Image (cartoon, rainbow, N blue to C red):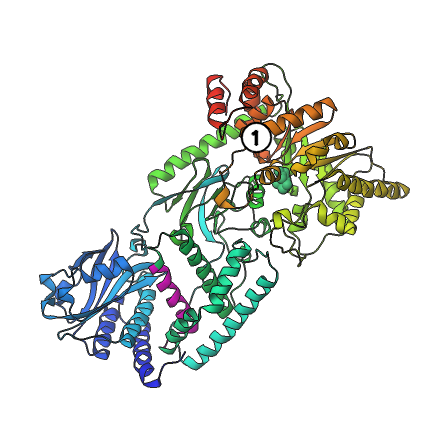
Amino acid sequence: MSISPAAVTGPRRLLKRVRDVMAGPGSAEERLGKIVTIIAADMVAEVCSVYVMRAGEVLELFATCGLAAEAVHRTRLRTGEGIVGYVAAHARPLNLRDAQSHPNFAYRPETGEEIYHSMIGVPILRGGRIIGVLAVQNRTERQYTEDEQEALENVAMVLAEMVAGGELVNRDELIPADGIALLPLRLSGARLAPGIGKGTAVLHEPRIVIDRMVAEDPQEELTRLREAMRGLQKHLDRMVEAVGSIDLGGGEDTGDILDAYRMIAKDTGWLNRITEAVNTGLTAEAAVQKVHDDTRARMAQVTDPYLRERLHDLEDLANRLLQHLSGQFQSPAFGNLPDDIILVARNIGPAELLDYDHTRLRGLALEEGSHTSHVAIVARALDIPVLGGVKGVLDKVEGGDPLIVDADNAQLFVRPSEDVRSVIDGALKARAERKALYARMRDLPAQTRDDVNISLNINAGLLIDVPHVIESGADGIGLYRTEIPFMVRSAMPDIEDQTRLYNRIFDQAEGRPVVFRTLDVGGDKLLPYWQDMTEENPAMGWRSIRITLDRPAVLVHQLRALIRAAHDRDLHVMFPMIAEVAEFRAAKQLLDRQLEREAGRGFVPRSVKVGAMLEVPALIWQANSLLGQVDFLSVGTNDLLQFMFAADRGNPRLEGRYDTLSPGVFTFLKHLVELCSDRNVRLTICGEMAGRPLEAMALIGLGVRRLSMAPASVGPVKEMVRSMNARSVEQYVLSLLDSPGKSLRSGLKAFAIDHGVKL
Ligand code: PEP
Ligand code: MG
């Protein structure tokens, strides 16, 4: 869309003049004084005023041309009060021929404004937050044109830079649109990985900083906009072609991407509004930001969840368009970062998380995320607290804000006060003391009060996890996720690389058994160098053993590397996602062949044990045949439960919908425990539930004797084991199997409290 030259000359000239004054000499207040005079003159208005939002939702008159000078810093309006307050409360312009007849008109004698009739007010927005109001008034009953309104909005956008820059009021005083000041805030979420972390906010997808607001040459800006749009469209096309891609960086599912795509493809309105803003003198970046700020502020009042989702899509698209315009694509992980990072993101994949220096990561706060998503698992392995489902965190947190992730109590403190900090310091100290207690328990047996021994093992996936097996006093590594080293590399590791890696794992485990699970990719575990792994329903798609059986070369290389590293040691190999016995047999055949081949080269493990992961419910219906062929079985409850309940483990909307502690899950596991015990097959539970003391208590009650968990869970689970009586828990748990209830959690908790079980 274009606008006639006559209509654009004025606004463009005005913008340039405002920008020149802003960049010129004088104090901020002096410059603001000049700006209101210029605007008043340009618009042939008797009054032009700027109100700035101060702490406590108060709009204060900061500069005026036309109203009484004494009113500056004296006239203050609450959000919602008067025309100015109305504009702030609704985050949209108000264009009135006769302001005095508007129900919101509030007369302030000190201003002398009773003589003015027409009035137009536009919000000064920054990142979707109201930070002020720009108003123009005339004596006569004048109807301001749409072009005039647009020009004022553009000026307001440029002014926003000045206000947000902290020259006029302290940045701490600026108030977000929802009425919460840049003062301390507490947001709630869900605990995805335990712990408490204190640090500085780093936005995983930082807002693009726009340093040029006013365009020299609108034609050039339009060309840039068109090119960036083409780049964005191409990017979206690639995503749509690869149906199922989750590469929006935010982890949206395909439906969202397609909706967003359709919206942008059809909604020329969005592009037209940006084009119009360029035509009135803004740079392409500033125009995208302006249109987006407008939408965001308007939608802040929308409560409909569907529409709010669409806002997220738009936000994502606007951000992507800004990336295309500015060329700023790189993850902040590769930039200069503080030593105490609290990462804030909508969602993030495990590999993206590992781009960050984990020794500096103190916590993770996600708008979305779910308990069994792999990012949560990786974070748990690294002992990084994670909060998920923190609604609005991206709107309310700025990069650099001090944050405290208190995942244990499911809360995030934004810019915490001294009081909160000192309470948290106390909690951190208590945690350190608890860790010391667990360290002291390291060499004590995981034995119940009635002398039942429980084998506690750790789940690992990174080299830094492995020493935890010694530090935590665990019996071994019950699950080594071999795909994690594959995910953090830019190319597939070759046999030599893998052999070196597995050798180091054996060495560091100092003789404790390590169960190596073969490559389990797909789902939310993507390899950056495998381009074609996108599909509509990845959790149930071509993943895990399905991939490695279809591409046996990958599995063969891995098995050879494992055999070589296991020379003269005990090799445990476990195949993931086995859905039917035939798959296990095919994988085992591959292993047998490689054992033979490598033996010919002098590599012979001391012993070889081969197991399967039970993650797909279908497998239990072949238990008879399966149990005759495996040396051990490990239940991956994360995947098993998503398939049992048909509930995507990564979907935050389903988080908490079905409880792991439900009668159905118990009955299933009880049956499995009996089958394995009858056939003398070693059974381990290695999903996330094994690492939670209450769940671990219930599993032991079901007869489970081996658990594998994140290293940080070993201490708390061991403490629980040593305080429980296996037989009494068993009796209680068995009495619950036929319960019609949804969850057995509260009953189990009460039981634990009554019987002095330490949770
Ligand atoms: C599981 O599914 O429970 C499991 C342990 O495997 P992962 O979480 O790596 O899919
Ligand atoms: Mg799994």
> Where residue 147 sits in the image (x, y, percent)?
29, 76
> Where residue 179 sits in the image (x, y, percent)?
29, 51
Residue 229 within the segment the image draws in magenta? no
Which element type, helix, strand or loop, lies under badge 1? helix
Residue 481, image quadrant:
top right
Residue farthest top in this picture: 450
> Where residue 14 sits in the image (x, y, percent)?
29, 78
Magenta-highlighted residues: 281-298
Q: Report ligand 2 position as a quadrant.
A: top right
Circle 1 sits on which residue? 664
Give the residue displayed 13% in from the left and 75% down from the top: 140
Residue farthest right in this picture: 600
Q: Please, what is the dominant secondary structure of the magenta stretch?
A: helix
**In the rendered structure, which amino acid carries the disc numbered 1?**
Gly
Give the residue displayed 19% in from the left and 56% down from the top: 81
Neighbor class of circle 1 (other Cα within 10 Å; few <14, some 14-19, many 20+) is many
Residue 608, image quadrant:
top right
Q: Quadrant of the N terminus?
A: bottom left
Is residue 211 in view?
no
Residue 287 lies left or right of residue 373; in this view the side is: left
